Amino acid sequence: MSMPVLEVKEVRKAFGSEVVLEDISITVPEHTATVLIGASGSGKSTLLRCINLLELVDDGIIKLDGQEITSVDTDPDVVRRKLGMVFQSFNLFPHMKVLENIILAPMRVHGMSRDEATEKALELLNRFGLSEKADQYPDRLSGGQQQRVAIIRSLAVAPRLLLLDEVTSALDPVLVNEVLSTVRELKDHGMTMVLATHEMGFARQVADEVCFLEKGRILEWGTPEKMLENPTNPRTKDFLQRVHEAGRL
Amino acid sequence: MSEDVRRGDGSPNSAPYSFGGEWTPSDFEIQRRADRKKKVRKNAFIAAFSSIFVLGTLMTIIVTSPGWKVLSATFFDWSYGFTILPKILVGFFESNVILTLIASASVAVIGLTLALIRTSRSPALTPFRILATIYVDMFRGIPMLLIILLVGFGIPALQLKGVTNNVFILGIIAVIITYSAYVAEVIRSGILTVHPSQRAAARSLGLSNFQTLRYVVLPQALRRVTPPLLNDLVALIKDTGLVSILGVTDAIRAAQIEASRTFNYTPYVIAACIFLLVTIPLTRYTDRTLRRSIERQNAQGQA
Ligand SMILES: Nc1ncnc2c1ncn2[C@@H]1O[C@H](COP(=O)(O)OP(=O)(O)OP(=O)(O)O)[C@@H](O)[C@H]1O
Ligand SMILES: [Mg+2]
């Protein structure tokens, strides 16, 4: 098998005295999706932010395409050019139209011409059924549409790896599905992804591997079938039970 | 709003999208529109009547009061006012207007620079950050009149070679020094209110620190602080009058010279009217931009 896109080895992160990530190791091969599940505060967002170098790890190593990105002389901007990240909310720049949002990074970071960037952006918008929104400001879009544009925007620079942090948790249930189907389509096209989600049904559909985090540790990991149907760790069972009761399974 | 309500009158460009096809308002709706019109007309009538009544009564009381004759002769002697109007206008355009233009342009640049220094996190800029903070704290805390006196009389007293004694230039410098501190704070507050996720989103796209500031943070920050900045502009226009204390013949000084010659205060009233002619439209405009920016922020989606 070829080299994995992402390797996280024994990563630790603390904020002050609060240890948020401890001994985290995951490997994400090309064209696979790794899903992080776990209760609120378990460290999912922090892990994604560490991969994106928005936070500095306290220990351990993160490798992208075999190259260490956590060394002191890594240029974060260079690493981020290879990554796409979509947050829970506040992704789009409200003072720019949808199209401008999408072409900003291709033009300013990747030196693409405006025409080329626009053409690519329209292609993407078209592919995800949002072409008629190109000239709108983000506040004219529904929450689900905004998140889909955010995902498209992160795709516009052809990332090696896509990081999605609970992209549906700020949305009401009806809008969740359109976003999830966008993600599913990306997965079907071979995009490599790490995503945090509370949607277990969705995790089952897209995940190649599911990692269960609790209090900053990966307590259990495996295929979605194993993790979601026959978890061995009692804490995982407990968590899924609670999710089930909340009606999200 | 009312444009949207009235769509469906059959004309093709009145509706942005026309699902559901033709629509003729029901009798009930037609009746409701007529009622609405009637109500609007009634409200307008009440507003007009009450205004005329209250303002008319006030005017009558003032004009019929025993002191009115002497008051209007000393303050509102329009024919005298008209003869000295050119002098005051010259002072206004040659001093206040020029001062406002030069000062506001410089203040914009200096204030923005100070705000950027204060909000930057680069370790190399630490000494500048400290200096900028001291500067802002100091000049926001000292009355501007004092700064004008200090700069206007203090600097010439030093008798330095090559430093100007021109009170006009010194006055401008004093205004710039003070207002840069105000404006820096306004812009800084704007920068701080841009949601941190916006920065994170921009950095995640690979934008550098500077690009993030340039394309994402500043445009939002400046848009948000436009109303308070316009307020500062109005204040600046008025405060240019303070440099008259240095002997600059601006509108106020010109009026003062006239008034002390004739012991009639109409020149002051004229000067006031000239300032109002500029500041009132600007204040109205500020109100409008404020209302619009609030609307925009309310409309802003979360995702
Ligand atoms: N910048 C920070 N400073 C201090 N503590 C932080 C910071 N960011 C996160 N934390 C803490 O780290 C812990 C993990 O937070 P994180 O956002 O990673 O959780 P999460 O699994 O994403 O939760 P959720 O499902 O609610 O999004 C929390 O206890 C949080 O309080
Ligand atoms: Mg989170």
Image: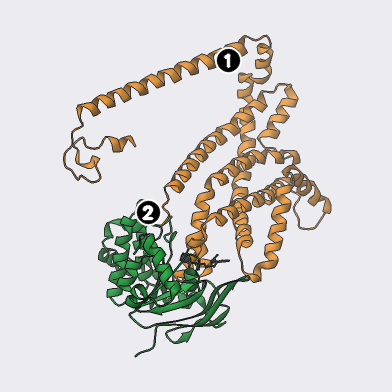
Q: Chain A: what color?
A: green
Where's residue B159, x and y in %? 82, 54
Q: Which part of the image, by quadrant, shows the N terminus of chain A?
A: bottom left
User: Which is nearer the eye, A127 or B272?
Assistant: A127
Q: Which residue is mark 2?
A: A137
Q: Residue at x 39, y 52 (%)?
A: A139
Q: Tell me the quarter of the picture where residue A20 sits.
A: bottom right
**Are the residues at dot 1 and dot 2 in contact (C-beta closer than 8 Å)?**
no
Q: Closest to the observer: B74 or B301?
A: B301
Tag 1, which secondary structure? helix
- On residue A205, the disc is none
Task: Give the orange chain's letter.
Answer: B
- Amino acid type, label 2: Tyr
Residue at 27% x, 64% y: name it: A128
Q: Nearer the viewer, mark 1 or mark 2?
A: 2
Q: Label 1 to label 2, Cα distance in Å?
A: 50 Å
Task: Chain letter for mark 2, please.
Answer: A
Closest to the observer, A96 or B33: B33
Q: Is mark 2 within 8 Å of ligand 2?
A: no
Quick check: can you spot residue A85? Answer: no
Query: B72 or B115, which is in the foreground?
Result: B115
Position of residue B303 in the picture relative to residue B125 (left or right): left
**Residue position marked by numbered label 1 in the rendering:** B58
The type of residue carrying mark 1 is: Leu
- Compared with A233, B225 (above or below) is above
- Please determine whether, in this image, residue B236 is positioned above or below residue B46: below
